[in-house]
Amino acid sequence: MSAQCYDEWSQMLLDNCGHFYGVCDSDNKFDGHFKVHHWYDLDVIDISCDVEKIKRTSRDVRRDDHEYIFLLKQVSGQTITTHNDKCCVLNPGDFFLLDSTLSSDLIYQGNKSEFLSVHMPRTEFLDWCQADIEIGEVCRANDLKGRVLDVAFPKEKEHFKTIDVGSDFLFDLARIAFLQEKKHTSVMRFSCSKNRHFATLQILNQNLTNPELSLEWLARAAKMSPRQLQRDFQSEGTSFSSVLTERRLSLFVFKLRQCLQLGRTPNIAYAAFDCGFGDISNFNRAFKKRYGCCPTEYLAQITKETPTQ
C-alpha cells in the first residue's frame, strides 16, 4: 500500500480513534498508513507513521463521547509513551494499555513506527476484569505475560478473518496480562473453557514446527496440567495428537504450494521435517489417510494446477 498523505491519515486517526492528533516536523514530510480491521468483534487499527508524536490533551479527552481502553502492540520501530504519570518505551512485540479518559503522548521523534491498536470499550472491559488493571505499564514481548497475550495476534494479519471467538477472549488475555497482582499467569484463568481451549490452540499453532511439541510441552507452555489439557481436547471431540497432525499436514501442503508458486521444486522430506514431523514413515501414513494418496502423488497433482510466478 502506498503512503497516505498526512491529511488523510490524520482524518482517519480522528474518525477511528477519537481526538488524537499527529504533530509533524517542520518540513511536513510524512510516511505512514492507516488500516482498519475487525477482529474478535472489535475494531483493530494497523497504524504506521513517522511524525514527531501523537498527542491527546485533557481538552481532547473531554471532546470524545466514547471511552476506550486501547490495547497497543508495537510491531516495528519504537514508541515512547507518557501516560497515567508514567513514561515507557515500547519495542517490537511489547504491549501497552492506554486509557482514553487520560491525556497521553506517543512520541516517535520523526522515526518510522508501526503498531496495532485494539479498541476495547472501557466500561465493558473494566467490568469484565473486576480488578485493578495496570494502565500505562508495558507488557514486554519476552516476558511470560507478553507471550500469553501474543497468542491473540497471529503472525499473518489475514488469519484473523477466520477467528470465531468474540471480544471476551481478548478481554481475558488482557486481564491476565495486566492485572496488578503478578502471579499465576495461566490460561486456566480464562472465564470459560472455550476461550481457554482457543488460547492453547493459538500456542500450538505458533509452535507447529517445534519438534519438541507434545501434550506435556503444550501443558507447560499454557501453565495447566496435561490431564486438564487432554480433557479440553476431548470436550471438543478430538485429541491433541489429531489436531497436531492435521495442522502440521495443512502447513506442509501450504509450503508445497508456496514453493511451486515461486517456481521451485519442493523437497518432500525436507518440507515434512520443517513442519515438525520427525518420522517420514509416520508422516507418509498420516498424509495418505488425510488426502487419500501419497505425498509424491499429491505433489504431481498440484504441480499441474499451480501457476508459477
Image: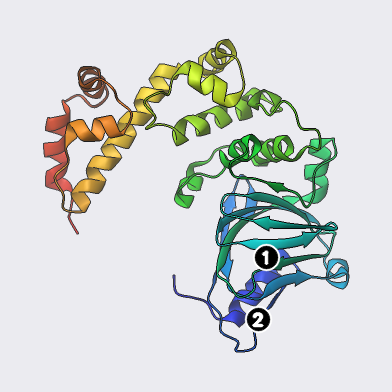
Q: Which residue is mark 2?
A: 24
Residue at image location 27% in from the left, 30% down from the top:
273
Q: From mark 2 to mark 1, how far is it between C-alphas?
A: 20 Å
Amino acid type at circle 2 is Cys
Q: Is residue 153 above or below residue 277?
A: below
- Mark 1: which secondary structure? helix
Q: Quadrant of residue 142?
A: top right
Q: Quadrant of residue 10?
A: bottom right
Q: Position of residue 225 (x, y in %)?
A: 60, 14
Please give the label number shown on residue 16: 1
Give the label, 2 or 1, closer to the camera: 2
Q: Position of residue 125 (x, y in %)?
A: 77, 43
Observer able to see residue 20 = no
- Quadrant, the C terminus: bottom left
- Mark 2: which secondary structure? loop
Amino acid type at circle 1 is Asn
Observer able to see residue 79 = yes
- Quadrant, the N terminus: bottom left
